[in-house]
Image (cartoon, grey):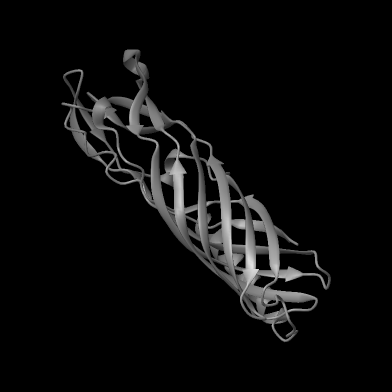
Amino acid sequence: MTNRVFTAGVAVIAAIGLWAAPAFAQAVGSGQVSVTLKGGWQPTIGGVMHEGGSGSVLNLTTVVEEKKWGDTHENNGFGFEGGIGFGVSDNAEIVANFEYGQMGAKILQVGTVAGLQLLAEFDDYKYWGLNGGARFFFGGGGAAPYVTVLGGVRQVSELPGTFSVPAAGVVLADTPFFKESWVPTFGADLGVLFGAGRTKFGFEGGFRYAGGPEGDDSGFAGTGLENLNDKGSRWSFPISAVLRF
């Protein structure tokens, strides 16, 4: 499903860009300042949330399977971004942005304890961050396709998990898993703006990479499962509505 959404999104944005490209006109002027607001859906398209492994919990053999972010969290995450641009030519500007977003968690089976079902439910993935880069326009007037390249940092909130074995009545609540962490980000957006005046609206899609948060092994010390949180990087495909002044 995610791959189909990703492919369809790229195709739609590319088609809009190709249709609008002949309308060449000044999209941004040197020295011009702009404000851009955008928000929308941020489906996960890749990244391992936790590794697999085997060990012993409460002196019972425990097996954990590798899970991706798309397994542990809902694909209904949303994000908001607000930024300022400064024109350096008639078709390019440098940009600086603030971002915020979150992604809801879901409960799932992650393995077994002594052959019994082991369930996990992690906290929601929440973040805020800063990024910057450059935006290049390929048209103007009534429609202006553009591409943006970005890099920055993101603070990801603390992310513990609740692990349970329903058949044995065992619940390990708020087990430390990821610490609150600063992680690197980078990505690119492809979009198109409409409108001939100073206020424009449009749509865009893109790619985002966010590094893995720092793992907190205190909840797994001595179990042989300390490697579970060694990963955590995530790829997403944000699809946003855009308003630019």
- 163 or 86, nearer to the observer: 86
Residue at the top extreme? 169
- 180 or 73, nearer to the observer: 180
- 127 or 98, nearer to the observer: 98
Q: How many numbered discs? A: 0
Residue at 69 percent across and 83 percent down: it is: 21
Q: Find residue 238 and report its horizontal and vertical position in percent.
A: 57, 56
Q: Quadrant of residue 195?
A: bottom right
Residue at the front extreme? 31
Q: Find residue 2 and report its horizontal and vertical position in percent.
A: 52, 55
**Quadrant where the C terminus lies?**
bottom right
Q: Is residue 153 left or right of residue 58?
A: right
Residue at 70 percent across and 81 percent down: it is: 139
Residue at 63 percent across and 73 percent down: it is: 146
Q: Find residue 136 and report its horizontal and vertical position in percent.
A: 60, 75
Whether 151 is drawn above or below 171: the answer is below
Residue at 68 percent across and 59 percent down: it is: 36
Whether 177 is drawn above or below 88: the answer is above
Whether 11 is drawn above or below 112: the answer is below
Q: Find residue 13 and report its horizontal and vertical position in percent.
A: 64, 70
